[in-house]
Image (spheres, rainbow, N blue to C red):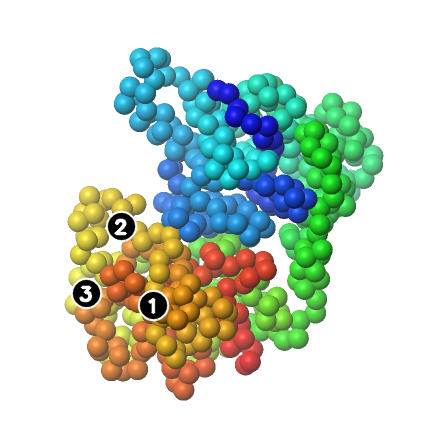
Amino acid sequence: MPKKNNRKYIFISGGVISGIGKGITVASTALLLQKTGFKVSAIKFENYLNQDAGTINPIEHGDVFLCEDGTEGDMDIGTYEKFLNEEMGSDNFVTMGKIYKTVMDRERAFGYKGEDVEAIPHVTDEIIERIFKIGDKDKSDVVLIELGGTAGEYQNILYYEAARQLTLRYPGDVIHVHVSYVPVPKHLGEPKTKPTQLSVKALNAMGIQPDFIVARSDQMIDTRRAERFALFCNMHTEDIISNPDLDTVYELPLVLAGQEFSEKILKKLNLPVKKPDLTEWKDLIKKIKSTKKKEVNVAIVGKYFSTGNYELRDSYAALFDAIEHASWAANIKVNLKWIDAQKIEKEGASVIGNPDGIIVPIGWGKRGAEGMILAAGYARDKKIAYLGLCYGMQLAVVSFARDVLGWKDADTAENNEKTKRPVIHFIPEQKELMKRRAYGGTMRLGGWDAKVQKNTVLDDIYLKGNSYKNKEERIASERHRHRYEFNNEFEPDFLKKGLVISAKSVVESLVEAIELPKDKHPFYLGVQGHPEYKTSLTQPHPIFVAFLKATSGK
């Protein structure tokens, strides 16, 4: 399989524990190279056999990141987008299931011309082809490849074998970065390098020698530990790079730059060595760490917070990022309170207390839904700023139907197929697909255009945020990930009682946003799309900025 140009490749693997921060390291490294003037691509290879991340419970593998083209990817894809300020898509996210399916489909079509189809070379060739494809598509100078999981797992061994083959074929054009955990046991009080030594040993057993170790720890690695790494991992001391805990992960590019990480990479790849221009990034960090003028409390009423005795941030990672980005722009410190919707069901809406704002985010299914409905009604009645995202919009509609229209039996057909008032339902085309359990075919995924009604809250938000796709025609675009819709049959009833339908899709006239007028409520907005997937570090989504300003009384 010939390489068509002089493109360079950087493999980033992980060691010791999962969730070590490979994605942040990939994004930070890519940013440094981008700010040096190189065109970069990033691709993530995941171990699981799912075709994508769309059917995985977020508690199991974190928040799904939704791309503009409808790809349901890993959280790391969102990290790439935010750091590089470039859209990711299907070519940036590959699962082992997608690889296997491609190979098997090709075999069924006689694409291998009668060969025995085997893991090596056919699966590894397909992995390498995906790497070449993203580089060719982006016309990139450097491709960064994140290998999912940790070194030594049997699930990802074919990825490592593909990396070994590519390294052997193109010496001088491929380097390996190993991100590994360096614990500091409290009873010892010093960093321990042995776990990483064993992780590197696993890499060596697969025929790979790392060029760099990025040491994840709660503090910078000292010279003594770096020398131990170098001695036992057959490396140079200067190639041990510290990745300590930071006040904000967005500081990492500056920390890596302080160790001349990108310059060392360029030298090993025989590329012109230049320093990255991080002026804008430094200004961003100053804004992030500056003292904020106001402080607000926001309650997030969700259903994917808990796993056993622990609570997870990752289940709503994109939402938390969006709130962070907006807080910098609004100059507001946000204190988040996570509230399990099932607790509201058991104890009543009073457990919410008196926050400045309430967000009901994405969700699926009946568990916790009644608690979210109560939260939407609580925000409406108490005049608390409310933002409903996807499921949060749908359940705000159910709440309005029950409390304002007086339809106590109103519900979403997702949770009650027998309700006589299915204010949220399947559109007819979806029903036949669902009968065949074709879940992937029933979703509205990716970017969808919507026409916004003039002189509404949403219109004002898009105008102030300069976010219209077409300002004159009031066309906006948001990413979608759902299969149920507002039931247009009941639209006249809602309008009579004061609910404002402020946006509908250009295709099929599906309801995209609902709100309450400003003279009835300080801020009450529900959107069917997912603005949290279209925010960036330098351009926070105006919906979140407007929501935070409303919580602070601006």
**Is residue 321 found left or right of 292 in the rendered image?**
left
Q: Earlier in the sequence, mark 2 or mark 1?
A: 2
Total marks in image = 3
Tell me residue 214's x, y (percent). 68, 37
**Is residue 128 found left or right of 175 in the rendered image?**
left
Q: Nearer the viewer, residue 188 or 376?
A: 376
Amino acid carrying label 2: it is Thr
Tell me residue 110's x, y (percent). 29, 19
Instruction: Name the secondary structure under disc 1.
Output: strand
Which mark is on residue 451? 1
10 Å crowding of disc 1: few (<14), some (14-19), many (20+): many
Instruction: Name the secondary structure under disc 2.
Output: helix
Q: Residue at x 66, y 60 (%)?
A: 284
Tell me residue 279's x, y (percent). 71, 55
10 Å crowding of disc 2: few (<14), some (14-19), many (20+): some
Disc 2 vs disc 1: Cβ atoms closer than 8 Å? no
**Is residue 487 found left or right of 526 in the rendered image?**
left
To which quarter of the image does residue 106 belong? top left
Instruction: Name the secondary structure under disc 3.
Output: loop
The reply to whether residue 517 is in sight is yes
Q: Residue at x 52, y 45 (%)?
A: 76
Q: Earlier in the sequence, mark 3 or mark 2?
A: 3
Dot in front, 2 or 1: 1
Query: Which quadrant holds the C terminus?
Result: bottom right
To which quarter of the image does residue 362 belong? bottom left
Which mark is on residue 419? 3
Give the spatial CA distance, label 1 vs label 3: 30 Å
Which mark is on residue 492? none
Dot in front, 3 or 2: 2
Amino acid carrying label 1: it is Lys
